[in-house]
Image (cartoon, rainbow, N blue to C red):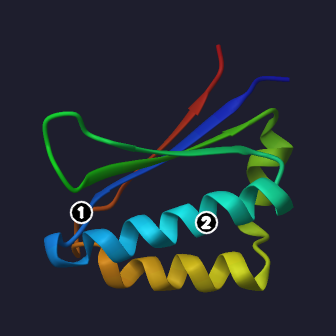
Amino acid sequence: MPKVMFTISYSVKPGRRQEYLELIGKMKAHLANVASPSYSVFEAKNKQNQFTEVFLTNSMEEFDALDDQDEATEAMVNQMEEYIDEGTKKYSTLVEA
């Protein structure tokens, strides 16, 4: 079974950076307790406020299960939308060769 990496890249509004970072901390802690995929968030080295969320799953089935979010995760994802610049989201799904 191939692993699947799902990424979401976007820019965060400069005035909302601290709130975003606090929310990401909560999201990491929450997902570590309730979800099986690996979850990390990275900031571009030379471009402040440009972030990429990375979900690494062990199979396509586990990847498909990402759509089944609990209420707390869904609430955090919805809140995160307030901090992201419109039109900057880019999604990528990569399957292990």
- CB-based contact (under 8 Å), mark 1 and mark 2: no
Give the tally of numbered discs. Answer: 2
Q: Residue at the spot x=21%, y=56% of the render?
A: 49
Q: What element carries label 1?
A: loop
Q: How much space separates mark 1 and mark 2, taking CA atoms?
A: 20 Å
Q: In this view, does 29 lie to the left or right of 35?
A: left
Q: What residue type is labelled 1?
A: Thr
Residue where numbered disc 1 is placed:
88
Q: Residue at left 79%, top 70%?
A: 68
Q: Is residue 85 left or right of residue 43?
A: left
Q: In this view, does 35 lie to the left or right of 93?
A: right
Residue 51's x, y, as percent?
33, 51
Asked whether 62 or 81 is in front, the reply is 81
Q: Residue sitting at 76 percent across and 54 percent down?
A: 32
Answer few, some or many: residues within 10 Å of disc 2's Cα (few below 14, many 20 plus, some between 14 and 19): some
Q: In which quarter of the image is the N terminus?
A: top right
Residue type at mark 2: give it: Met
Quarter assignment of residue 93: top right
* Quarter holding residue 77: bottom right
The quarter of the image holding the C terminus is top right
Query: On residue 27, which mark appears?
Result: 2
Give the camera-side residue of 57 and 18: 18
Q: Earlier in the sequence, mark 1 or mark 2?
A: 2
- Above or below 12: residue 70: below
Q: Where is residue 85 in the image (x, y as percent from the top left)?
A: 22, 73
Residue 88 at x, y percent in the picture: 23, 63
